[in-house]
Amino acid sequence: MGFDSYLSLVHSLGLGDSGGGELGAYDLLMTRRWMLLAPRSRDAFAGIPVNALGFAGSLLVRDPEQLATLEWLGPMEILQSVAEPAPAA
């Protein structure tokens, strides 16, 4: 996994132009063997902030109200609400 793999993901998801301009919003998770780039349309849903940790399985809440919202909506609903739809194949 290297910079070329990262650039390939950015290009395949349509996050940036070839001119090196600013990229769209995304979260990045990576290990030595794989990389996940999750394009985002926003950084929170229903008051619950989402960052790369959310896509790794850890949604962090600030208070009992946010916890109740998370339990009611479920983690997948929150992640789907902040993520951009997959590009057409």
Image: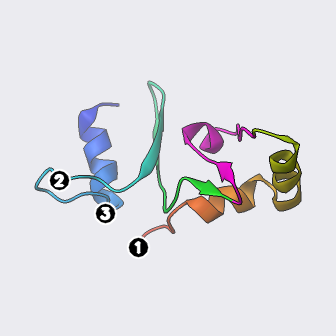
Query: Tag 2: residue type?
Result: Gly
From the top left corner, tell me how far across and down residue 84 is, in percent: 50, 65
Residue drawn at 61 percent across, 47 percent down: 50
- The image quarter in which residue 62 lies: top right
From the top left corner, tell me how far across and down residue 56 is, in percent: 63, 38
Label disc, if present, on residue 21 of the rendered structure: 2
Instruction: Identify the residue under disc 1.
Output: 89
Query: Tag 3: residue type?
Result: Gly
Label 1 vs label 3, nearer the camera: 3
Q: Is residue 36 visible?
A: no
Label 2 vs label 3, nearer the camera: 2
Q: Quadrant of the N terminus?
A: top left
Labels 1 & 2 near each other (Cβ < 8 A): no
Query: Tag 1: residue type?
Result: Ala
Magenta part of the chain? 46-61
Residue drawn at 70 percent across, 58 percent down: 78
Work out whether residue 7 or residue 47 is closer to the camera in this orientation and state it: 47
